[in-house]
Amino acid sequence: MHPIIKTSKKVLCTALEQLPRGHLVAASSLVASLLVILALNPEQPLPQESFEVTTQDIITDTELADSLPDTSLLLAKPSNQTLATAINGLAFSDINSILKPEAAVAAKEAKPVKPAMQELTIKSGDNLSSVFARMGLNDRDIYELFDGNKSAKDLRSIAPGQKFEFLVDTQGKLQELKYYKNNLDSLKFTRNETGFTSQQISLKPEVKRTFREGTINSSLFLAGKQAGLPNTLTMELANIFGYDVDFALDIQKGDQFKVLFEEQYLNNKKIGTGAILTAEFTNAGKTYRAVRYTNKDGVTRYYTPDGKGLNKAFLRTPVDFVRISSAFSLSRLHPVLNTIRAHKGTDYAAAIGTPIRATGDGKVIFAGRQGGYGNLIVIQHGQGYETRYGHMNSFAKGISTGSRVSQGQVIGAVGKTGLASGPHLHYEFHVNGQVRNPVTVQLPQSMGIASNEKDRFNSATQTLVAQLQSSERNSRLALGETKTKSN
């Protein structure tokens, strides 16, 4: 190696080791500039003023001047070619080896930060436009999201408390959106080359069975609260046994209840309460029991453990009405025909469009137009019971001849089709082919489990009853251990 190159390299390395961090960066820039100039024209004389300015800048810096050794050899007017060779001999790897890691990282250009998902909670009064505006987006972004994407229609029904997650890039363009309908169901939109794709996401919670029991001292509500039973299940408990126990008049101090119900968990966090699976209620020394069962047709009801129905088989009225406009009568003057004709049902006056509900479980054996009835639905309920709903304005979606319906299900809307002087529902109740007054007829208890489904019922419910009893025993043992320890 040429002596000048060897000496120059040694001098520069020594100087760089002594320079503060800020000066190291400046020195690196200086070397890079000189390399570019010499590489372009190595034979061209180096501009004296440029060299002198650079030298002056370095020498006049107080900290640098104090720290640098004698650099006379470097500035002893070597030829341009010699200087270029010397500088090229000092590779950047030598400089990088001297710079500390922190300085090297700081000298590199910072990498762009990747946009992160931003969460937003729906507030009262929000709509899609206001939600997007809070994220710096506009109606054009909403249009792009909806364009050709049928799933986006779900975004029209947002509600307070629901959550969104937005991923917006550095140019302010929406790249991804997550809409959380509830704790389990969400909708994800992802941008691609042509628009947005959508994905429905449904999480499956862990379902646990929970046992609660209590003794009434003042009211069922307070007893349920003390036992840790959610208010909704306390009300459900009253509804289950409501046909046997009057919870306003029959409740006595000392009455007891036991309940086995479902709770839902996600990531070990409780997210919801399910239905009562089985329960007991003791009133004035008499115990009533109930189990929840879904039959082959998908209808869920509560029954006694031996398969008897707990509720009434029929609702008393099929519609929320203003008044009875025409009662059941076998000798009524027809308001349209102006003749004496038996009125084999009850007319309930109500506004057009008022929902009509099936008064019992059954099968639709007719749904269509029939003479003076106008739009008519006839439901067969089994064991000789049949109900009719006339003058309807329209039928509910999915209701047609052959449809299965459950008690309380909306089957259509009030109208004035057929021979009707005004909007009302004409309701008939038949028993074994004979018409009965629906207001005064003795309604039967809910029909029990059919004989051909008894085995299926027993298989599904006996386990629940056994688990309720087992939970009760375990609760008694735990209570006994607690008392023993406290004594």
Image: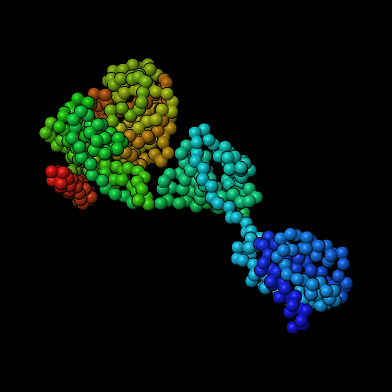
- Relative to residue 157, is residue 458 drawn left or right? left
- Residue 148 visible here: no
Query: Residue 131 sits in which quadrant?
Result: top right
- In percent of width and height, residue 219 lies at 22, 29
Furthest-bottom residue in this view: 1
Q: Residue at x 26, y 28 (%)?
A: 435
- Residue 75 visible here: yes
- Relative to residue 6, is residue 81 drawn left or right? right
Furthest-left residue in this view: 285
Q: Residue at x 58, y 43 (%)?
A: 135
Query: Residue 5 sits in which quadrant?
Result: bottom right
- In percent of width and height, residue 384 lies at 23, 36
Given residues 304 and 344, the one toward you in this image is 304
- Relative to residue 404, is residue 447 drawn left or right? left
Q: In this rendering, is residue 256 above or below 26?
A: above
- In percent of width and height, residue 328 lies at 29, 21
Q: In this rendering, is residue 152 above or below 54?
A: above
Given residues 1 and 88, the one toward you in this image is 1
Query: Residue 1 sits in which quadrant?
Result: bottom right
Given residues 202 and 333, the one toward you in this image is 202
Quadrant containing the C terminus is: top left
Q: How is the image coloured?
A: rainbow
Label tally? 0
- Relative to residue 182, is residue 145 drawn left or right? right
Given residues 431 and 280, the one toward you in this image is 280
Q: Residue at x 35, y 51 (%)?
A: 268
Q: Residue at x 66, y 68 (%)?
A: 17
